[in-house]
Each structure stands twice: as C-alpha cells, then as structure tokens.
Image (cartoon, rainbow, N blue to C red):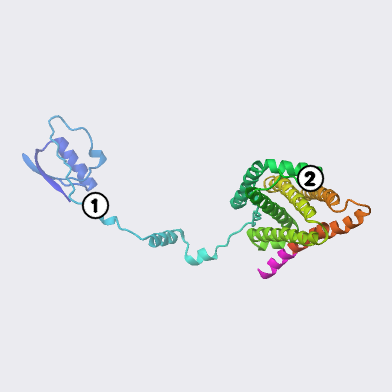
C-alpha cells in the first residue's frame, strides 16, 4: 500500500475526513495536537470523502505513478486449437458431441448439365458461326454459280466455276461443321431419351463420339458414291453429282446451325427440334433426289433405278447412322 506522509493542522474537517477514512478501511491517519503527521493512502478514496476542500486546505492525496503494467501478466498467446477447445469447453460441447450431430433437411435436386453454361461448347459454336460466315463470304461467287448450275442443267462444263484450294478447304470445314451440328442435336436427344448415358458419361465424350461418327459417315458416303458412280456413269456425271452433293451438304450444315443455337441457348423442346430437323432433312433429300434424276436417270423408266439408287445410298444410311449413334452411347455406358 502506498502511503504519503504530510504535515497538516488538526482541524475539524480533517478529523471528520480521518473518521470516514477509518470506516472505509482505505487509509489511516495519525493525528496529534499541534502539527500532526498524517499517513494517507494513495488509492481512490471513498466517494463520501470527495467533497469540496475548505478554504486554505492543502491537497493531501496525490496519485502515484505506476512502474509496471498490471495487465502484462494476464496476456498469453494461445494456439488456435487450444482456443477452440476452450470455447467448446465453455459451451459444453466436446468432440464426441460434434461427431454425433447430424444434418437435417431435404436434399435439393442437382442442377442438370446444360450446353449453354459450358464455355467450351459456347466457344465452339461461336467459332463455327464466324468461320462459316468467313467461308461463305470468301466463296460467294463460286457458291452462287453452283446454285445456278444446280437448278439449270448444263450440257457442257462451266469453265468459270473451278474451285480454288481455299474454297475446297472452306467446303471441307463446312462439312465438319455439319457433323458438329448433328452431334449437338443428338446430344439433346441423348439427354431426353438416354438418361443413364447422360448422367454417367462425360458430355464431352458423348459429343466427341457423335461428331466422330458423323464425320466417318460422310467420308464413307463419299467413298461409296465415288466407287459406284465410276462403275455405272461417266466422269462428267460423277463430277456433277459430287458438286451437287457437296452443295446440299453445305446447305444442310448452314440450316442446322440456327437450329442448334435454338436448342442450346433457348431450350427448344425436343419435339419441336425433331420436327424442324426432319423438315430440313426432307428438303435436303428432295433436292438431292431432283438432282440425281436430272444427272443419272433422265430417261424412260429411270424412276425405277432412281428409287433403288436413292434408297440404297441415302435413306438406308440415315437409319444406319442413327443406330450407330445409339449403339455408341450404349457402348460408352458399358465400358464406363
């Protein structure tokens, strides 16, 4: 206890303050008559002692400066796990109690995969669109002449309709784009009618296999057409048919691009998608049927040969393509 010794006079006010201090136990003052020595504690006094001083009364209580930090001993670093354990002990929870807690509620339905939320598919579709515009704009003169020749049968070859290497590469790209559009549309069919495949197989794998099968389909068709036509028809007729078939394939890919965008970004119903796809496919096959009759079977009873030729090389391969795509999905599910 810090004390201060002062020399003061014995006055009635001082005696009253000394009596109150004795009652509170916070200080002790010894008084003698005359000049007396008083020992006063420096701790805060009793509130009852904090009255106004009498005139001429000297200040008898002075604060002492602290030489140490009284709170320094109470600070101590605690690791995070020790602090968490202390909180758990204060709240009455232990590790066994935490392990016994089980989550409650109803599980939500997972959000299904959609092409429109996939950045890779979006990039592929956007690239297909811009490259298609570039190819068509770069080959517009050649394509314009090919469309004119498609509906106006020429007896002699058009010397101004020769393809350049750039135009040939552009047409090859448009054929591949047609395969991509077919893969996107078949993926939408898989999502609706082959839910097991869609839920268990990666969408990229389904799309990649579909595009690969469609590419193989067009390559095989071109090979079969070349082999059969070179046997039964002249070189000029084979070239006319190859140009006409390529033009219809390019038109099919261009027509399927808006349909694919509607399916991906606007949730076009599967039934409406199938109706639009069948309509586009029928128009494409009717154009091929018309050109095939003009080039190969423009004679009496030629429609009989046309029926056999067209059904064998156009109608049956479409059915085979669809069955191959469905079988490929089931095979992916088997090996998964």
For disc 1, the marked residue is 70
For disc 2, the marked residue is 150
Residue located at (38% from left, 62% from top): 82
Q: Is residue 86 magenta?
A: no
Question: Which percent across, then down, holds residue 217?
Answer: 73, 60
Frontmost residue, 292 versus 233: 233
Q: Is residue 334 magenta?
A: yes
Magenta residues? 327-336
Frontmost residue, 302 versus 255: 302
Q: Residue furthest left?
A: 34
Residue located at (71% from left, 46% from top): 254
Q: Where 111 sits versus 231, above or below?
A: above
Question: Which percent across, then down, holds residue 157?
Answer: 76, 47
What is the CA distance from the residue labelled 1 to the residue labelled 2? 102 Å
Residue 30 seen in render? no
Q: Does residue 240 appear to the left or right of 335 in the view shown? A: right
Q: Residue furthest bottom?
A: 335
Question: Which percent across, then down, holds residue 133?
Answer: 65, 43
SS at circle 1: loop
- Occupied quadrant, residue 104: bottom right
Q: Quadrant of the C terminus?
A: bottom right
């Amino acid at each position: 206890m810090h004390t201060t010794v002062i020399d003061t006079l014995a006055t009635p006010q001082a005696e009253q303050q000394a009596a109150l201090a004795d009652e509170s136990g916070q200080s002790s003052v010894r008084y003698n008559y005359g000049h007396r020595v008083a020992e006063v504690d420096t701790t805060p006094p009793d509130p009852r002692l904090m009255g106004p001083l009498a005139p001429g009364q000297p200040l008898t209580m002075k604060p002492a400066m602290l030489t140490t930090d009284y709170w320094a001993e109470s600070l101590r670093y605690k690791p995070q796990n020790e602090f968490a354990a202390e909180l758990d002990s204060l709240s009455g929870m232990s590790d066994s109690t935490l392990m016994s807690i089980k989550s409650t509620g109803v599980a939500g339905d997972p959000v299904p995969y959609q092409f429109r939320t996939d950045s890779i598919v979006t990039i592929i579709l956007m690239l297909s669109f811009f490259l298609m515009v570039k190819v068509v704009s770069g080959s517009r003169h050649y394509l314009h002449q090919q469309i004119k020749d498609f509906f106006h049968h020429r007896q002699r070859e058009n010397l101004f309709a020769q393809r350049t290497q750039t135009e040939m590469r552009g047409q090859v790209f448009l054929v591949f784009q047609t395969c991509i559009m077919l893969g996107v549309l078949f993926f939408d069919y898989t999502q609706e009618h082959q839910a097991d495949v869609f839920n268990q197989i990666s969408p990229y794998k389904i799309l990649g296999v579909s595009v690969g099968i469609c590419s193989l389909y067009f390559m095989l068709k071109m090979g079969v057409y070349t082999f059969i036509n070179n046997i039964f028809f002249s070189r000029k007729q084979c070239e006319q048919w190859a140009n006409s078939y390529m033009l219809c394939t390019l038109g099919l890919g261009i027509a399927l691009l808006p349909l694919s965008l509607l399916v991906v970004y606007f949730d076009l119903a599967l039934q409406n998608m199938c109706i639009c796809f069948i309509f586009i496919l029928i128009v494409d096959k009717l154009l091929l049927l018309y050109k095939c009759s003009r080039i190969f079977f423009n004679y009496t009873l030629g429609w009989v040969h046309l029926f056999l030729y067209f059904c064998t090389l156009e109608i049956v391969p479409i059915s085979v393509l669809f069955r191959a795509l469905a079988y490929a999905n089931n095979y992916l599910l088997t090996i998964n």
